[in-house]
Image (tube, rainbow, N blue to C red):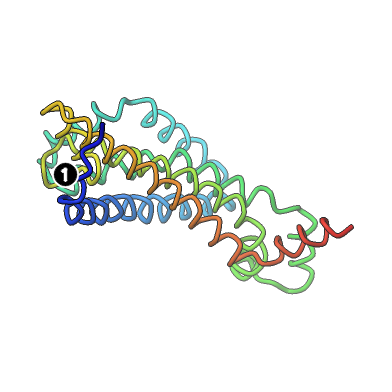
Amino acid sequence: MLDWAWIADHLPALAYRTGQHLYLAAIALAIGFAISFAIGVAATRWRAIYLPAAMFADVVFTIPSLALFSAFVLITGIGVVTAEIPLVLYTLVILLRNVVAGFDSVPPDVREAADGMGFRRGARLWQVELPLAVPLIVAGLRVASVSTIGLVTITGVLGQSLGGLGRFIFDGIQIGFPTEIYLGAVATIVLSLLADRFFVWVQRLVTPWTAARRLAGATT
């Protein structure tokens, strides 16, 4: 049975931990996306860059999260930086692949047509290739956001000042209080679902032509 009175008394703590969870996840996603996008753009010109970057991301992704967080404590101490470095590294394997796959999905004849119309390479990238790559890039952000929100709960092992909603789970396990465990777990799941829906909305906002295409297909 859930202790609803306890939940009602801890709504301010829930709001605080939710904000902290979003803060930690947003920083990791923003930095991870910036790194992945920069490497992805560079890979469109110098393909040799992609393979070692992808291999590095794959190796990092195989390291258990608890071990990686703990390892960085010895280097950077206990704090936000220690939490963010592994979170950022874990986003790379998802975001980097999707950014590169997005640019690779642009048909060669589209690039040739853009060149024939006088687009410089930089203008072609931003005005032609990027809009076509957006669906796959946003798909990567959807997966990375859900993954990162889940991983933020693990940062609770670093102390009370971190962990976001994961602190409810860790604290509940320590004192054997199921209500606190369920509160942290359910709130994390809800946050993941909302993040996924947010990026679906972003994709529709920045690629309105895809919605028009789906509508046209439904009416035929």
- Which image quadrant is residue 149 in? top left
Q: Is residue 149 left or right of residue 2?
A: right
Query: Which of the image's four quarters has the N terminus?
Result: top left
Along the viewing direction, whichever of 216 and 168 lies nearer the viewer? 168
Query: Which of the image's four quarters has the C terminus?
Result: bottom right
Q: Is residue 69 left or right of residue 53?
A: left
Query: Quick one: which residue is furthest to the bottom in this view?
Result: 118
Measured along the vertical axis of the image, is residue 76 above or below residue 137? above
Along the viewing direction, whichever of 168 and 195 lies nearer the viewer? 168
Secondary structure at numbered mark 1: helix
Q: Is residue 1 left or right of residue 47?
A: left
Give the residue type at disc 1. Answer: Trp
| Residue at figure coordinates x 31%, y 25% from the top left | 64
Along the viewing direction, whichever of 171 and 210 lies nearer the viewer? 171
Relative image position of residue 86 (x, y in whole percent):
28, 39
Relative image position of residue 7 (x, y in whole percent):
21, 46
- Which image quadrant is residue 210 in? bottom right
| Residue at figure coordinates x 65%, y 48% from the top left | 104
Relative image position of residue 11 (x, y in whole percent):
20, 53
Relative image position of residue 55 (x, y in whole percent):
46, 32
Mark 1: few/some/many CA within 10 Å (<14, 14-19, 20+): few
| Residue at figure coordinates x 13%, y 42% from the top left | 76
Residue on which the image places disc 1: 6
Along the viewing direction, whichever of 166 and 114 lies nearer the viewer? 166
